Amino acid sequence: MGSLAESDGFEVEENDKRRTHNVLERQRRNELKLSFFALRDQIPEVANNEKAPKVVILKKATEYVLSIQSDEHRLIAEKEQLRRRREQLKHKLEQLRNSRA
């Protein structure tokens, strides 16, 4: 059997491991909390709500991203429509210039 000193050394090592694990876990939770705060501050609907639950932050973030994607698709379509209209007007202008020449 191991001596009492070996047993004490094992306990000290286990306590050190546990302390290290606890410190790392605390850091991880703190980083996660700060990430939620950063996300919350980017979502207009919850940006001013410091007590917004994490699940609400995630739901509102999802809604916000979907809204932005929808806006992006709409704006891309509008941009394409305006590009086509510009080409039509340029063509018409060119025809008018040629008819006057």
Image (tube, grey):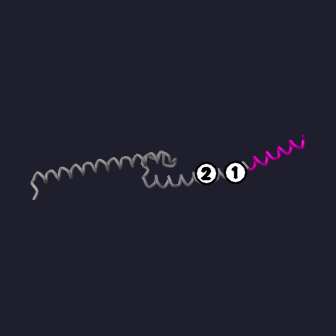
Farthest residue toward the bottom? 1
Query: What amino acid is labelled 1 in the image?
Result: Glu
Query: Could you say where residue 65 lies in the image, as x and y percent from the top left?
Result: 54, 52
Numbered disc 2: secondary structure: helix
Q: 10 Å neighbourhood of mark 2: few (<14), some, or many (≥20)?
A: few
The residue closer to the viewer here, 6 or 83, is 6
On the rendered structure, is 1 left or right of 81? left
**Chief SS of the magenta region:** helix
User: How far across and how far down the image is residue 83, in percent?
Assistant: 72, 48
Of mark 2 and mark 1, the one earlier in the sequence is 2
Does the stretch in magenta take in 65? no
* Mark 1: secondary structure: helix
Q: Which residue is mark 1?
A: 80
Disc 2 or disc 1, which is closer to the eye? 1
The boundaries of the magenta stretch are 84-101
Side of 59 where 75 appears, left or right: right
Q: Quadrant of the N terminus?
A: bottom left
